[in-house]
Amino acid sequence: MSGWPFQGSDPGPLQRPRLAGAIAAGIAAIPAAALVWLTGSAQMPARVIGVSQPLLVLLSIAGLAISGGIYGAIFLRAANDRRGGWLFGLGWGFLTWTLGPITLFQWLLGRPVAIGRHAAYLLAAHLLWGLLFGVVFPLVQNMVKRTIENAPSPREQSLRRRNPDDRPPQRYRRMSTAREN
Amino acid sequence: MIRVVSYWKAILAGVAGALAWEAAARLLIWAGLPMFDMVRLLGNLFFDDRQSWLWWPAGLVLHLGVGALWAIFYAYFCWSVLRFRPPIQGLIFSAVPAVLAILIVRPQLELMHMPTMAHFPYSGLFGVSDGWIGPVGIVLGHAIYGLVMGALYVRPVGRRVGTERAPDPDRAVPDLIFKPAPDPPSLDNFMFATGIECSYPTIEKGRWRLDEMATCGHYRHWRRDLELVRELGISYLRYGPPLHLILRGPGRYDWSFMDQVAAAMQQLGIRPIIDFCHFGLPDWLENFQNPHVPEALGAYAGAFAKRYPWIGHYTPINEMYVCARLSALEGLWNEQCTDERSFVTAARHLAKAAVLVTQAVRRERPDAIFVNNESSEFYQPCCPDPEIERIADFENERRFIPLDLLYAQAPRDDVRDYLFDHGMPKDEYAWFMSQKVPERTILGVDYYDWNEKVIDRDGHAESLGELFGWYVITSQYYRRYKRMVMHTETNSRDPAEAPMWLWRQWHNVELIRKAGVPVVGFTWYSLTDQVDWNIAISHPVGNVTPVGLFDLNRDVRGVGLAYKQLIEMFRDSTLVCPRWGELDETAALPPEPKQEREAAQ
């Protein structure tokens, strides 16, 4: 995906932003789900939507993991920003809250999914998730990224694409052989 | 990283914007006008409406926090995107939180007050069922916020001159455990290099300093940066110690940062090419019109070489022609003059500084190697108009002035007269021409895709893109100075194109070596992305130019891996036989464009 407007945001050859986003979001969803569960704020949305509370929590974690993958796909290289990651994540948490429980469900059901302090906890849980997600993302990225030794260079990839027999010219084959040895 | 953001400025601007909103809202409410009260709505989440001494500070603090967060968003995503004055940029940005506040936040906050909701009638699922007072009040409040915040968030990078402090090396990120250092490469090996971008010019008539090492995070991540150099298999590092932070006054030096960096370089087996002056000067030396600059830089270089006797490669002054041109002819940096006399003065002082620096270093280290790099420039006339051809011809001679003075190479007669006409004393010219150029010098030729320019019908130089390429332009410099050559800078601003640009430059090097020109090194500049480089560091904007082997998060770019592969491929096969001093011109080089034209006629 190259829709991100900032030049140079294409992911690096070692990075896996979508995978890192999904994993980081899944991890960050656990304390957020715990907050909603422990404050009893899952009851009303579960009743309104018509599912059990445990299922709602599981679906929420899955939904947030997908949201994290989309975040990685949109932000790409910038998702790994150690300095601004917490803020981007917080913003993403707010956006997920805005588009999910608020806009989508209110529009579909024609009524709010939560009111009173439970509505406040729902917002707090999304902001907590976003904040943790943004902080955890670079750590997860670091774990899932390819190593510098194993990454194909862009030239090698490009030459392989151009060669119908999928064999790079001699000088590049020599490099691959040396690596294998 | 997409942009360098000043957090404390953004937070202050956001808080100030939210305060201005609250002040305006409170005055209107006290005056009895219908104004939406966001602070009350927030404060009542925690305290009863009758306890105004509690809900007001609580609501205000929460609103100020939200204001600060939005301001940091603005700093990251909107600042400098639109070409308007900063308050207007802030005003336009404020439409985003205003819309969200009307459609989402306000109705949700009202829902959070349920089931009591005594003071806040519900404005409907999307906040538009309660008349116009609420939405208009929210838009008005955000407009005030945006104007104030936008007006205050300016100049996110750089520091006011006189307030810079030497970096504390102990505050750097301690994320490095040095691996055992490989042996430094033999001097017979080809020099594969990169550099840490280190420009530190002043702008705004000397009041504001842009320090690239600071904005690119090198002071914080210097250990990691050095390790990254070795991770890619690079042995040579063009490195400009921050002159403005080290040379604190005549004979006064602060070596605290450089001592640690030098020790780490030694430990990692990195051979630095030390760059003494990179487009800027310490505050007390002011600018390049100051006649005391050459002696001051000479003394600094001598002290440096004495303190770090193991360092053997030096660049006395980086890109003298570019420095003189942008400081004294185009008015972007330092003295910001725009006249020929100032240009000649800056060029004289820079060239003299290079001579004195070279002499001072040689006194401490007689076997030092000097890499005199210059931006390769070429001017092409757009049309067969004699005036346009004259301008192009003059510019093609003017580009050589600083190197001519440094290498005691007599300029063309008309250029020499131009120097005399614009303030160069004849005895100073004679002094330059009488200098004995050290044997162990390498001519560094930098090349970017805007180095070749066309002189248009109005007589202005416009970038032409890569027309003849490094091979042809370097041939012109080699033919003039007859020294060993190093490709000392190149990069591409398009990260997708960068690996191909790298290989194109490398094939230029291979080709010119086959033609007989002794090229001894190659440099991708720089290690990390740079900041505001696309606008020649002329304004403190903070935009990242993605030209590095690594981005500013220190994540490798595609070109970083391509360079690593290139080095692995050619490190052992590309050997150098040092041929010091002025060389016999035996290279089979392409003819000069002028010779070509004459031959055609």
Image (cartoon, rainbow, N blue to C red):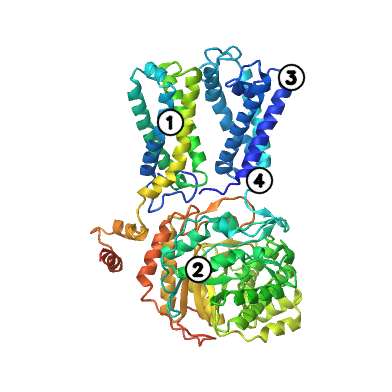
Q: Secondary structure at mark 3?
A: helix
Circle 3 packing at 10 Å, graded few (<14), some (14-19), many (20+), is few
In this rendered view, identify the residue nearer to me: A135 or A10.
A135
Residue B332 is at least partly visible in this image = no
According to the image, label 1 marks what residue? A32
Q: Secondary structure at mark 4?
A: loop
Residue B163: mark in rendering: none
> Which chain contains the residue that carries disc 1?
A
Q: Secondary structure at mark 2?
A: helix
Circle 1 packing at 10 Å, graded few (<14), some (14-19), many (20+), is many
Circle 4 packing at 10 Å, graded few (<14), some (14-19), many (20+), is some
Q: Are marks 3 and 1 on the same chain?
A: no
According to the image, label 3 marks what residue? B30
Residue B150 on image: x %, y %: 65, 39
Q: Are marks 1 and 4 in contact (CB under 8 Å)?
A: no
Kindly report which numbered mark, 3 or 2, lies closer to the viewer in this rendering.
2
Above or below, comparing residue B190 to residue A128 in the picture = below
Give the spatial CA distance, label 3 vs label 1. 41 Å
Residue B78 on image: x %, y %: 57, 41
> Which chain contains the residue that carries disc 3?
B
Earlier-in-chain disc, 4 versus 2: 4
Above or below, comparing residue B3 to residue B253 in the picture = above
Circle 2 packing at 10 Å, graded few (<14), some (14-19), many (20+), is many
Give the spatial CA distance, label 3 vs label 2. 66 Å
Residue B581 on image: x %, y %: 54, 86
> Which chain contains the residue that carries disc 2?
B
According to the image, label 2 marks what residue? B265
